[in-house]
Image: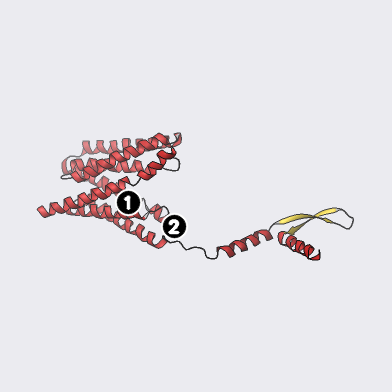
Amino acid sequence: MALHFTWVFGFGLLGNIISCLVCLAPLPTFYQICRKKTSQGFQSIPYVIALFSAMLWLFYAIFSENAMLLITINSFTFFMEIGYIAVYLFYATKKDKILTFKLLLLFNIFGFGLICALTLLLTEGIKRVQVLGWICMVFALCVFVAPLGVVRKVIKTKSVEFMPFSLSFFLTLSAVMWFFYGYQKKDKFVAIPNILGFIFGMLQMALYLIYRNPKKNEVAEPKTQELSEQYCSDINIAMPQLNEGGNEVFEAHSAKDQTKEAMDVTTKV
């Protein structure tokens, strides 16, 4: 029994450490926002969703037994996301501020408030823990599925510019730690979502290894030259000509014809 709880604590502690590193990953982004004094080009949706997720897991951990490690990491995430959103709102445009406030009202106030009210009024004891666990698990699965958009973009563009390897690696490692934590603790609501997190993390790292060195276009110069010639051949230039009566008329000649005529004139001279 002691060994069992030792493994639970070990995996939970490693999960806390790695998840903290993942949570600190946006700091360079917000450093740029503060330095440039604008949040233009960035979205607040990931931070609102992360805050909502931390609130759900905190609420679940409060009623779950021996869940102190879940409380510590989600408390840290909660305060970090509050800080990120505060900085974002300070530098955001009026339009982005309105959108962020709408998201906060929808998820973090109305959504979370509704979940709290229903679970507190309609459930109690172990039933309440199970209902909250199912809610957290479903939401976590949705969050893990979200990166599929990035995966699709990588496959389509054959570029890993928007999928840094370090972030994918630490997310995968975090999923492994929390899976074993849930498995050892016999908490399926923690273990099951992280199976999907591990699978998607491995998929992202595999795509990174495949597309990390995009093939360079070795025949770029000939293609450019060919494209230039094709472009020139399609350009018609109106050149004045004399008809039999001595009047000027305009006749369309291609760029190639003009070049050829110029060369003929030069040769004659």
- Label 2 to label 1: alpha-carbon separation: 21 Å
Circle 2 SS class? loop
Which quadrant of the view contains residue 101?
Answer: top left
Which quadrant of the view contains residue 32?
Answer: top left
Q: Residue lying farthest front?
A: 269
- The mark found on residue 16 in the picture is none
Circle 1 SS class? helix
Depth check: 87 or 269 in front?
269
Q: Residue at the location (81% across, 65% down)?
A: 268
User: Would you say the residues marked 2 and 1 are in contact, meaning their CB atoms lie under 8 Å apart?
Assistant: no
Q: Report crowding for label 1: few under 14, some 14 to 19, many 20 or more residues within 10 A (C-alpha).
A: some
Q: Residue at the location (24% across, 44% down)?
A: 73
Depth check: 51 or 213 in front?
213
Residue type, mark 2 in image: Ser
Does 81 sit above or below residue 177?
above
Q: Identify the residue under disc 1.
A: 144
Residue type, mark 1 in image: Phe
* Quadrant assignment for the C terminus: bottom right
**Residue 133: x %, y % from top left:** 23, 46
Mark toward the start of the polypeptide (2 vs 1): 1
In this rendering, does residue 52 appear at all? yes
In this rendering, does residue 107 appear at all? no
Q: Residue at the location (35% across, 39% down)?
A: 84
- The mark found on residue 159 in the picture is 2
Left or right: where 81 falls relative to 63: right
